Amino acid sequence: MRERNGGPHTGLIRLLAAVLLAASLGGCAAPKKAPPPPPPPRPAPTEARDVLELPQDIAAYFTPAQMDVPVLAPQDQARFAARLRELHFAPWHRAKPAHARVSAFWGLAGRGQAWHYGENLRPLGPDFRTQMQALARPEEYPNTMRRAITTANTSLRVLPTVRPGFLKPSLPGEGYPFDYWQNSGLLAGTPVLATHTSADGAWVLVEGRVAAGWVPVSDIAYVDEGFVAQWESLPLAAVTRENAPVMAGFAEEGTPPVHLFAGRIGMLLPLAGLDAGGATLLAPARDAAGRAVILAAHLSPDEAMPMPLPATPRNFALLAGQLMGQPYGWGGYLGNRDCSALLLDLYAPFGIFLPRNSSQQAKQGEWIAWQGLPPADKEAQLLSRGAPLLTLLHKPGHIMLYLGRRGDRAIILHDIWGLRTRDEAGKEGRFVVGRVAVTTLNPGAELPDVARAGLLLPTLDGMTLVVPPQAAPAK
Amino acid sequence: MRERNGGPHTGLIRLLAAVLLAASLGGCAAPKKAPPPPPPPRPAPTEARDVLELPQDIAAYFTPAQMDVPVLAPQDQARFAARLRELHFAPWHRAKPAHARVSAFWGLAGRGQAWHYGENLRPLGPDFRTQMQALARPEEYPNTMRRAITTANTSLRVLPTVRPGFLKPSLPGEGYPFDYWQNSGLLAGTPVLATHTSADGAWVLVEGRVAAGWVPVSDIAYVDEGFVAQWESLPLAAVTRENAPVMAGFAEEGTPPVHLFAGRIGMLLPLAGLDAGGATLLAPARDAAGRAVILAAHLSPDEAMPMPLPATPRNFALLAGQLMGQPYGWGGYLGNRDCSALLLDLYAPFGIFLPRNSSQQAKQGEWIAWQGLPPADKEAQLLSRGAPLLTLLHKPGHIMLYLGRRGDRAIILHDIWGLRTRDEAGKEGRFVVGRVAVTTLNPGAELPDVARAGLLLPTLDGMTLVVPPQAAPAK
């Protein structure tokens, strides 16, 4: 029965209705002369104590003297940056797809996908899979081999559709926003290899620096030799202001500047000029025929800086501070980040490459396994051997960044969905944090339902010391 | 703790896990020699009986002799079509916004919007409103007065953001997918007036034929006098194949055809040529500077036809058949339709204008009020006075199309989210139909939880006989 009653007046009515509803649910007006009602039960906490009590600012975990001391030696950082640059452009230098058919089309596997639910919260059913199969036409893979670049902040999708695939929404930690067809976010200006086109021409399977997936053809533009040569002739700059508008001006009379896309932390674009007024970057745009053109975009000094930025706590705090509190987004949903995307984007401006998911990220350095270690020993080892800002913590499905100590507790930065809970009846649920936060290794330990289900620290299985690549790549 | 474990192998593991989970939940292997377990409780129905038993095809409700008899006289249809055309182009002929500031910015009203939840299922909070206020800068309204056209199928948003605003997700019928910042779908090729631009240049407030809202600037292109003159010089064609790819070819050597957007039922584009091979339509595209260019797109004979189509049951069945079963989408979410959008888009190819929401739609003709009438009398009146395909049924928040009779029951077509339910303990919920369906006036009457909460027919407050405009507009 539910439908759109849109428009301004309905909006006001809806507003009023919501207020009235809230009032009626609150039960605020006690009947006259009745005895005072018993005090209402204390409302359940909506925040973990860590988030309320720990400074949500990286700078708080460093002394003023530490703030401008790089955590990486210049020659190590140069090695990192050379590798990141090589991997960034790698999709343009592939003669064949890096992904085999079986891995490019795993979303089509299975039998009818009865366990996936659509946006109407009903099973997607076998018709959906048939439709996806016909659009994806895996038997022709790869039917396209063209170099391209993203011209919008977009998503890598598991299937050529904007429709979601939820696991059973009634399961704890499932349903919205955990769309399993959402593979990864993909920033504008990313070199990609287009390997395959959907039957209707609307979707293209692309390989980028860290992941592959389907993107709308309108979010990429095809590049030619001249574009690639110009793009690769310059050093890279990192966007350092989240959502800085990337605008292009035009020499032509009567053509106002145009907004191309939002700059995002993690975005890398060629640096064409730099002075006290800021940076001039190359920005890609798409023409009406789907070809890439190069436009110049000017960003202010705090919006873009040469990559790599000096790896100082001050610069980490500058970037992380803009991401703090941002909503969690599984697989880059709505342009948000999940735990691994947070670290991937936070490290890129410093020239440090990280792969796409948490288990891969944990392998990017020296892995110290914690299996079988008592929780207190894990924390002690982290405090003694971990290098702040250069140590990753892992448990299956989650990755975190070690910031340092506060008293005798280790402090971490992570993008966290929720803490597993178990109520008194034994029913499992989630206490949703749902954002980028600074916590101890046991966030929510004070919440009985969280404590019953088990804390974070005991589940950590190791830490990774991020170390530079063995040698600068030959390229 | 939840994060992306993407990639092909994880996908397979996930698949396996889902299968194992399904198996373990199913409890399929009984222990050896144990007594046979009691029969499992009968699973709750997942479909309303109407949807299972009534033909989900308009043609089933007409005799073969009726199928090709227009339900509208040609002169009446011409009046309808002239009015639709005028209203379609109207946003290009406005010297000032049709929407006052208070109605253009109602999403900013309220106090902190504590009752709206974001994509992480937590309250959006006052920071969100502050951020929206700064982006929308209502004090400057209107800061832009430019004619434009949509170059993609997009959404009209209440606020300049892709982030959702849910009412409390734990309330029945609230939470995903009911994003209150989603105002309406907006098809490609729609003439709009851009009245206002967000502070970051990324969003533009536009007025279209039936609604206004924020769209990403990348989904529109600005038109000049020449574009408008050429666009308005031709008759309009209606897209008659849902998701027909609208592709443009290029004369230039080495430039392959490009997919512009998906054709959708309800889409109107200028008709430049028509022969036995199909229709040549004008299609809009956006150049790298945000200007609109006109491209030619060829569609096959069943993909596009001159507007208005003959208003025969066969043509209604042709179009409605493609929409049957499509998922419900509040305010056009993911390009889906809600109840009023279904009728708006189904009527447009026949030249009949409908406004955006159900209460406005119910006023587009001769309204026959049913307040106080016993349910049986309502149905009897509908069966005696209602004209199949030209009679709308209304209850607050829902609109339906009368198809005709089957035996002594009236049959309707509608896009329906859910039926209100009340379980034995009195708890309210929804039985989700979640799609376009053909039903009686009391779908789900056989479901005890639905019967307890109340059926549809008693809540209908009237019917609307769709009648032609008084005279052809002067234009």
Image: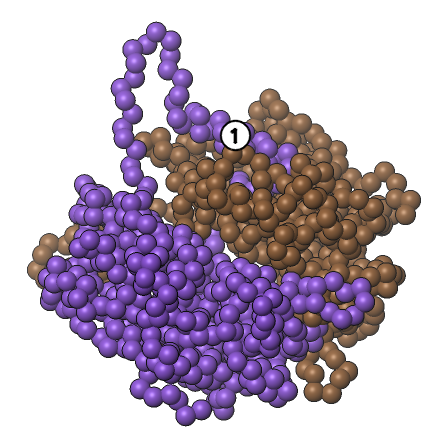
Chain colours: A purple, B brown
Displayed quadrant of residue A261: bottom right
Q: Residue furthest left?
A: B33
Nearer to the camera, A73 or B250: A73
Q: Residue at x 30, y 58 (%)?
A: A63
User: Disc 1 marks which amino acid?
Assistant: Ala
Q: Residue at x 76, y 42 (%)?
A: B98
Q: Is residue B167 visible?
A: no
Q: Is residue A16 visible?
A: yes
- Residue A433: x percent and y percent? 34, 50
Nearer to the camera, B356 or B374: B356
- Residue A227: x percent and y percent? 62, 83
Above or below residue A233? Residue A409 is above
Q: Which residue is mark 1?
A: A17
Q: Residue at x 60, y 75 (%)?
A: A273
Displayed quadrant of residue B239: bottom right
- The 10 Å Cα crowd at callout 1, few under 14, some 14 to 19, many 20 or more, is few
- Residue A193: x percent and y percent? 52, 82
Nearer to the camera, B56 or B268: B268
What is the quadrant of the N terminus of chain B in the image? bottom left
For disc 1, the chain is A
Q: Residue furthest top?
A: A33
